[in-house]
Image (tube, rainbow, N blue to C red):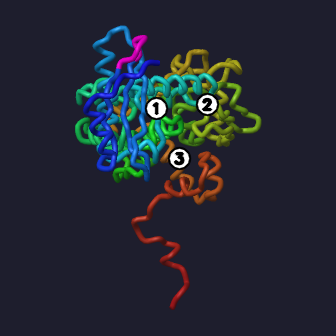
Amino acid sequence: MAKKKMSATQNSQLNLTAFIDYVPAEVQATKGNNWLIVYYVKEPSKLKMKRFRHRVKKMSNKTLRMRYAKKMCSAINNKLEKGWSPFFEGDYAQQYKTLDSVINTFLEQAERKHRDNLLRKESLRAYKSYFNNLKQFIDEKGLKNILAVEFDKTFVIDFLDYIYFDRKRSARTHNNYLNFLNQFGIFLNERKIIPANPANGIPKRKVGKKKREIIPGTIKNEIFKFLAVNNITYLTLCLTVYFCFIRRTEISKLQVKHVNLIKDTIFIPSYISKNKKDGIVTIPNKLKKLFIKHLEGSENDMFLFSGSQFKPGYENLKPRKISGEWAKMRNALKFKNEYQFYSLKDSGITQLFLLNVPLIKIRDQARHYDIKITETYAPRNYKADEFLRDLDFNF
């Protein structure tokens, strides 16, 4: 390949290697329509420069290709100005890909994991949502054709501020984005696309108290009476969450075959479970009576709760339909919004604490991987404890 002759400016700079650390990147055209980004960096402890080159990918539109090449030059020169050296960090050639292209690679691999049952559909949907908002941020800030190398700590912090302050999302949402950006940063770093994960070390925002509340006994009775008359199949679903602590997405995928009324158990297979592990929970007698009625005429390969009025069937139940039905019931009974669908699970676990069920049994029924998670559901006592008050001990 024919080399382009060095410019007069570069020759002059190279003659002064004792006083400079680099020669800025510029675009050079060679034979065969090949374009190169060329720059020079002083070798450590030596008075000479080493030449570095990056090929500019071919494009049908020459104007777009030049715009892309100049963006590469700008990104390299910005790094050089900040003291970056390829001798110390290694030359990550892939960092001059567009951020959009590496996002597509990430999503393609996520799609493959989903097909292999290694990633939940909900997680894949969340990834796409995060990236859609990231692309919206890029468009609004006029950062089109941003390169992977520009995905640095400043960019990540600016995006998180955009989510929290501009979009007015909660601290919890901010932290969810930070967790995701950390995953994406690890992905890029492991593939030598960027030299370091820019999300690493960024602190999470302090999260306030959850908006949902434990459902009091009187409210639970009203819900039971209302659904027993108006929607018995949805009542069965709600009590499955209350007694067995099965998550909304998991319950939408359970099949009739996973319920064993002889052993009084529900099996949650790993491909359904949030933690990707098989689990078994116990069916209490009060729920079993409802299940006997619910399962009449069903077949093993049917969904336990289908999209057809929550009855056993072959139509997949969308998780949001579960929450939507809860909202309709709550509005009909004029309950406050803090009584959310997930309050059922919280309320059920809390009730077991109040019944003095051993902590280890609560942990297993809730399928918590760590007993510390179970302990977070322990209800706080804001009045005098009778046991401690009457205990016979003194100084």
Q: Gap between marks 2 and 1, in whole Å?
A: 30 Å
Q: Gap between marks 3 and 1, in whole Å?
A: 54 Å
Label 3 or label 1, whichever comes before in sequence order: 1
Q: Which mark is on residue 348?
A: 3
Residue at 38% x, 12% y is 59
Q: Secondary structure at mark 3?
A: helix
Choose mark 3 or mark 1, whichever is in front.
1
- Depth check: 1 or 281 in front? 1
- The three-letter amino acid code for the residue at tag 1 is Ala
- The three-letter amino acid code for the residue at tag 3 is Gly
Q: Which range of residues does the magenta coloring cover?
A: 29-34
Residue at 47% x, 18% y is 1
- Contact between marks 3 and 1 (CB within 8 A): the answer is no
**Residue matched to label 1:** 93
Residue at 28% x, 39% y is 13
- The correct choice, above or below, for 320 with respect to 203 in the image is above
- The three-letter amino acid code for the residue at tag 2 is Leu
- The correct choice, above or below, for 107 with respect to 273 in the image is above
Whether residue 33 is in magenta: the answer is yes
Q: Which mark is on residue 231?
A: none
Whether residue 317 is in magenta: the answer is no
**Residue matched to label 2:** 118
Residue 251 occupies quadrant: top right
